[in-house]
Image: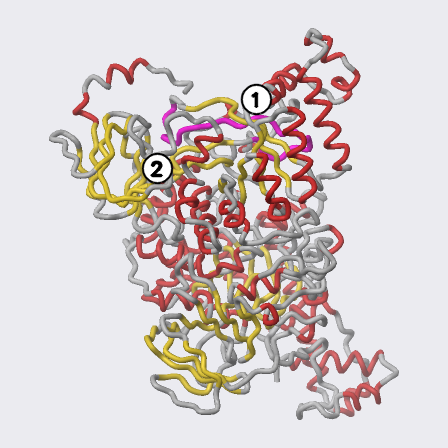
Amino acid sequence: MKKLSFLIVLLSINVSANSILIKSGQINDGLGNSFIGDILIVDEKIVEVGKFLNSSSAKIIEAKGKPVTPGLISPISNIGVVEINALDVTNDDSPDFFGPGFSVFNAFNPHSTLIPWNRSNGVTSSISTPGYSSQIFKGMGSFYLLDGDIDITGNADVAMYARLGAIGGSRAETIQIMESMFELALNKDELELEELLGTTFASSMDMQLQDIQALSRVVNREIPLVLEVNRAIDILQALRLKNDYDLELVLMSVEEAPLVLDQILASGVSVIIDPMDNIPDSFDELASNIKLGGILSNAGIKVMFSTQRSHNYHLMRQGAGNAVAHGMTYQAGISGMTSIVADVFNIQDRGSIKEGYFADIVIWSEDPLEPSAYPTTVIINGSEISLETRASRLTERYTDKRDIPSSYKH
Amino acid sequence: MKNHLFLAFSMLLIYSCSEDVEVSQSSTADAPAKSSSLERDPFESNYKPLESERTLIKSVNLYDGLGNEYSNFDVLFDDGIIKEIGKDIVDNNATIIDARGKWLTPGLIDIHSHMGVYPAPSVRTSSDGNEATSPNTAEVWAEHSVWSQDPQFSLALKGGVTAFHVLPGSANLFGGRGATFKNIPRNIIHDMKFPGAPHSLKMACGENPKRVYGNRGSAPSTRMGNMAGYRNAWISAVDYQKRQNEYIKKSDEAKELVDPPRRNLELDTLAGVLEGEILVQNHCYRADEMANMIELSKEFNYKITAFHHAVEAYKIADLLADEGICGALWADWWGFKHEAYDMVPANIAIVDQARGGQGCAIVHSDDEVGIQHLNQEAAKALSAGLRAGYEITKARAMRWITSNPAKAAGILDQTGTIEIGKDADLVIWNKNPFSVYALTEYVFVDGAKAFVRGEKELQPVTDFDLGIINPSDERASL
């Protein structure tokens, strides 16, 4: 965590002032377990998970058997870095200058309207990623807590993003460029950085110091490479790159993964998919199939979820629901939005309902995989968060039947 | 007598331009009696249903698409038409489907699709959905762009969609004509056209036209430029309509003395709107712009059938209800552009409930994935409506994806509800269709099994799907 605030340490002395006891929830802990139980939260952390818990000082929230899950973590989003897609002055997700060295971290706007919207729908943290880029490596994404606090809690540069496939030019050259960049970052000749930048390859690729440093983190397994890839043979090429350069690899999209299932399983990589995208949208995605989530997950591959549209990252719930409807297990659906994301992206002590973990918890109106479900309580870092959004304010205004101009309804 | 005016125009064209008058006459001699033997719809529907059998669905839970829910009901259909609805129907000649515990709904209808005109794969060579070369391309017809082998049709069918309306894109003030199709994939597009369904005219407000043409340094580049563009076009259309009607009213003798007025494809479409034969489907996000479009329609005396996308419809829900204009809306899309910023998830419910439930709300997709899950989109919209304090039943919400889009497409007299005499466009779901876990089991189009889950021979496979990954396989099993 970037925020290493001593203030929190001071606050934690006053235990009773900030504790919450959730009673009788249908707890899906994110780790594959489901049980009726209670959760005791003190300050930022979960201190106890069990049955018949009591606290004389905690605020009691009766879950009454409703589903309780860890706060959802979006593994790929533009929360805080894009406000309106088609309005470029509100977009901070794409570099003009850097390639792999681009970091979105400092662009995050804690007052973005996407934050209340997504968290009121159950997403308590997210990884905001670089957006469109003409380059192969799009840069690095960062992790953020969606508490909306101006004092941002997050992890900078948790993963590198790249893509392989029908993106213009030959995919053979894309692979060659990736390999050349990895070679450069490995710096087997132990050149000074200045010398590295002066190589013909680096200078013709317009590589900057930051680009090489970022790629070094990838080849040294400090951060995962999230590689968007679809065609079956490209997936095998990606797995070969993983082997050749000892990468921590995460595959994204992988619409033709069922054709190379055994190889993916053997490689141990995890995947991010949009389970609802069954459209053969390019000649790389001909095997696209709504059963993708279940096929991968049931084979033993860790599956996380992306969403097709911007802004509504909570819709990974609907994606997970559709995956479950088409063969994925229910608990794999829950874990794919919580503990697996935390695990893959090294987000410490989040993504599960577990003693000692940060209390990012959602209580739901009904099964959270149902599109009609919504959170009734959202807790981030142990604090109950308002569910109000700009949308709820607009709804109130326009369902207010008083005969006065809407501008005066507030 | 649909398209009377256009039929007349076609006739004029044939008389004035064609040397092949006799052939034209004889080719339509067998057509049903019309006021002239030459009157015919160009590119008219040649749809024929698949073969069907007399079928009795037993003991099913049913949403009729009119707002009613029934338990343990039976539905009998034959010759593609719903014959009987009720309890304990006995019929010894029908094939029985025991649907105990399952759900029956009308076939779903999407009023805003670009299937076929933006087919999959999404590649330059078949991206034919928007003739974005002029602000007014009312002369183009979406059906002339539709690729009949689009694999998206079958995916939508599996999602319960039995009819859909294909629109041109929104780069233009007037984008051209939309057309409605039965979701039976065929290799000639007119074999899919919904019989008797009216054309629509796609109009677009706001950011898209002003961006596309403004960026080229031509009009419109502003919203006021958009309005001027519509008004100028309607002025021409009124004039055109007048000249055509004056000619048509002349006696045969008088007609011989003058040249017929020259036909114009662009104005044909606009005049068709003025005649009430072509329905206006108007892409428009902002409340203030929708109000302007309503004023515009009054200035030129035409009717707007539906505002599409209409992210701000909730701000003028009463006005839409008063004007009898439907809102064809998403459950939750927002933020992709400035005019889509003020999204509220209760938008559909607010439009539905305007003036005590007089509103016409439609869940539309505008999307090849969304069209497969219209039931889930309706579930989200319903949930948001309940949270906003409205009392709306699931049975009523079912109207948003059945009878209301049928009404907006002008096909409600044939489909969109489960009523005696209607086309047997029906879906059997294994669970309540408002659940994410609900899957279609049978999709009937005109009483024929167009899709049956688990039965490969009853699932369409397009030419595109065939042998494209491995020669011996289909692309992906449904």
Q: Quadrant of the N terminus of chain A?
A: top left
Q: Is residue A190 above or below residue A135?
A: above
Q: Quadrant of the C terminus of chain A?
A: top left
Neighbour tally class for label 1: few under 14, some 14-19, many 20 plus, Cα within 10 Å: some
Q: Is residue A322 above or below residue B53?
A: above
Tag 1: residue type?
Arg
Give the image location of residue B428, x and y in percent. Answer: 45, 71
Disc 1 marks which residue? A221
Inspect this view and state whether residue B304 appears. Answer: no
* Chain of the residue under label 1: A
Residues in magenta, as a range: A130-150
Between B369 and A290, the one nearer to me in the picture = A290
Q: Which structural element holds mark 2?
A: strand
Between B361 and B272, the one nearer to me in the picture = B361
Disc 2 marks which residue? A70
Neighbour tally class for label 2: few under 14, some 14-19, many 20 plus, Cα within 10 Å: many
Image quadrant of residue B436?
Answer: bottom left
* B46 sits to left or right of A161: right
The answer to whether residue A23 is magenta is no
Q: Is residue A150 above or below residue B387?
A: above
Q: What colour scheme does the image use?
A: secondary structure
Tag 2: residue type?
Pro
The answer to whether residue A136 is magenta is yes
Whether discs 1 and 2 lie on one chain: the answer is: yes
Q: Which structural element holds mark 1?
A: loop
Which residue is located at x 41 percent, y 77 percent? B98
